[in-house]
């Protein structure tokens, strides 16, 4: 389920309970089933309005977040670790994560990995680090292809 849908349901339930509790205070002769229906209807109508009002502050902060690109980094030295690769790529931009691939059976590094970094820095890294030397090896840096799953 989408988080916005869950939040919408929670706000609707809270508003329905409030209307159910407050309606008998205003109109003492109102039957309980009508106050419950009125609570759900008002909650359902008001929840999206309230969420759009208060949710707009969240969307404005999310628009300032950076977009990330994943880079394939090949021909890495087997002795290289995540920290060394991260420090090398941080000279080009903000690095979000580094994953160096290992052989499942032996646990030894395979000589390639993936660096997730801001898109602007990723483009800079491709330009500046592809075919450059890193720990006596010539790196191959490209945009990673999407993972293909076979059925």
Image (cartoon, helix red, strand yellow):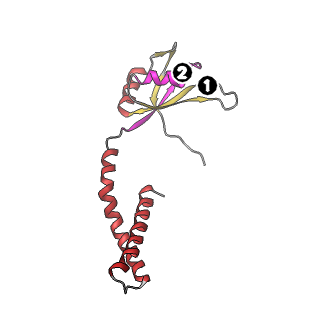
Instruction: Where is residue 33? Give x, y as percent.
Output: 44, 82
Asked which secondary structure carries label 1, the reply is: strand
What's the residue at 54%, 42% (across, down)? 148
**Nearest the eye: 87 or 8:** 8
Does residue 73 show up magenta in the picture?
yes
Q: In this view of the protein, which residue sits in the foreground, 49 or 87?
A: 49
For label 2, the residue is 76
Residue drawn at point x = 42 percent, y = 59 percent = 7
What is the number of the mark on residue 109? 1
For label 1, the crowd category at 10 Å Cα-Cα, with few meaning under 14, some 14 to 19 and many 20 or more, is: some
Q: What label does residue 98 carry, if any?
A: none
**Mark positioned earlier in the residue sequence (1 or 2):** 2
Relative image position of residue 11 (x, y in whole percent): 40, 63
Q: Are marks 1 and 2 in contact (CB under 8 Å)?
A: yes
> Viewer-proximal residue, 39 or 115?
39
Q: Nearer the viewer, residue 142 or 76?
A: 76
Q: Which quadrant of the figure has residue 35?
A: bottom left
Please provide the residue range marked out in magenta.
66-90
Residue 91 part of the magenta-drawn span: no
The relative height of residue 60 versus residue 80 in the rendered view (above or below) is below
Residue at figure coordinates x 36%, y 65% from the top left: 47
């Amino acid at each position: 389920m989408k988080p916005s849908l869950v939040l919408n349901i929670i706000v609707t339930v809270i508003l329905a309970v409030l209307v159910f509790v407050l309606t008998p205070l205003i109109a003492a002769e109102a039957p309980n089933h009508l106050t419950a229906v009125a609570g759900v209807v008002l909650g359902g109508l008001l929840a999206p309005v309230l969420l759009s009002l208060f949710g707009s502050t969240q969307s404005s902060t999310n628009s300032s977040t950076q977009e990330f690109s994943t880079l394939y980094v090949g021909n890495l030295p087997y002795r290289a670790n995540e920290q060394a690769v991260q420090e090398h790529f941080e000279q080009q931009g903000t690095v979000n994560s580094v994953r160096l691939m290992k052989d499942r059976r032996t646990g030894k590094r395979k000589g390639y990995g993936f660096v997730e970094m801001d898109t602007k820095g990723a483009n800079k890294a491709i330009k500046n680090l592809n075919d450059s030397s890193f720990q006596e090896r010539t790196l191959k840096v490209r945009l990673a292809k999407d993972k293909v799953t076979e059925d």
